[in-house]
Amino acid sequence: MSSNTWTLRAVESEARPSHAEPWRAVESQHRASTLTLVDSLAEQEMLEELIEQAKPPIPAEARNLDYLLATPFRYPPSLHGSRFRTPADAGVFYGAKEVRTACAETGYWRWRFMMDSPALLEMPAVPRTLFRSSVSALIIDLRARPFVRDRSKWTHPNDYSHCHAIAHIAREARVQIIAYESVRDPNHGECFAVLSPEAFARRTPTKQESWLLTVTRHRVYWQSQSGNAAFEFDPTLSHSLADRLLGRFRKKK
């Protein structure tokens, strides 16, 4: 891990109580999909129970949360972790202040998955759920002074070592939320890394929306199923430099 110049005392002195309502995009969960694999509702119930038993246990501090809020704390990260989580860390719930930013972040990673699968030329439209949560806890904002002086470290597109280091110190300082700048959103929207399930002010999402996500090798498209909004991004740009135009956005009026 790269060296870190931030001390526990410095982080503690900058922590402030705050409230946020992050949006997060996830795969749509349709329980009815397992019904096609069985012959009755009773068999479906048994199958669902078996699937649940095969999953990692939900941490005790997250058991009172809706599954949409608890899931990020349940599963281990990828081999290399994520922006504020090493493979050895507890879970992190990532969200964004704006729907557009949540779409940009999720769309980029779906594009990366496709690009790592040479046989895939595109990923046809699939349903996604966007939901808003409510969090209230101690927060540090990496976009504000004094942390902003290390902006190039927090927004590096591939090197997460500095973010890992500040997240470790934040946990020691009992900070439960890190506000930061999106690297994948063309507008550099505000994001939140929720480090603890205890930060949630409400146990269930405050709002849910249904969207469709389409991914090609050069574009990511989002469209709300209500038909009143759509986003388009060029993920190839956000794959290069962090401090440049990362994509394209359009919104239907």
Image: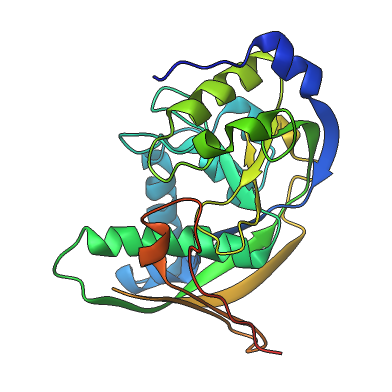
> Residue 44's quadrant in the figure?
bottom left
Task: Tell me if 15 is positioned left or right of 252 in this view.
Answer: right
User: Which residue is rendered at x = 52% and y = 43% of the image?
Assistant: 155
> Residue 175's quadrant in the figure?
top right
Vertical relation: 126 (above or below) 92: below
Nearest to the observer: residue 59 or residue 168: 168
Q: Residue furthest left?
A: 119
* Residue 196 appearing in the image: no
User: Which residue is rendered at x = 75% and y = 32% of the image?
Assistant: 145
User: Which residue is rendered at x = 75% and y = 45% of the image?
Assistant: 203
Vertical relation: 29 (above or below) 55: below
Colouring of the image: rainbow
Task: Tell me if 192 is positioned left or right of 42 in this view.
Answer: right
Percent of width and height locating residue 241: 41, 52
User: Which residue is rendered at x = 74% and y = 34% of the image?
Assistant: 199
Task: Tell me if 10 is positioned left or right of 181 in this view.
Answer: right
The N terminus sits in image quarter: top left
Vertical relation: 151 (above or below) 125: above
Percent of width and height locating residue 216: 32, 76
Percent of width and height locating residue 79: 30, 34
Nearest to the observer: residue 77 or residue 46: 77
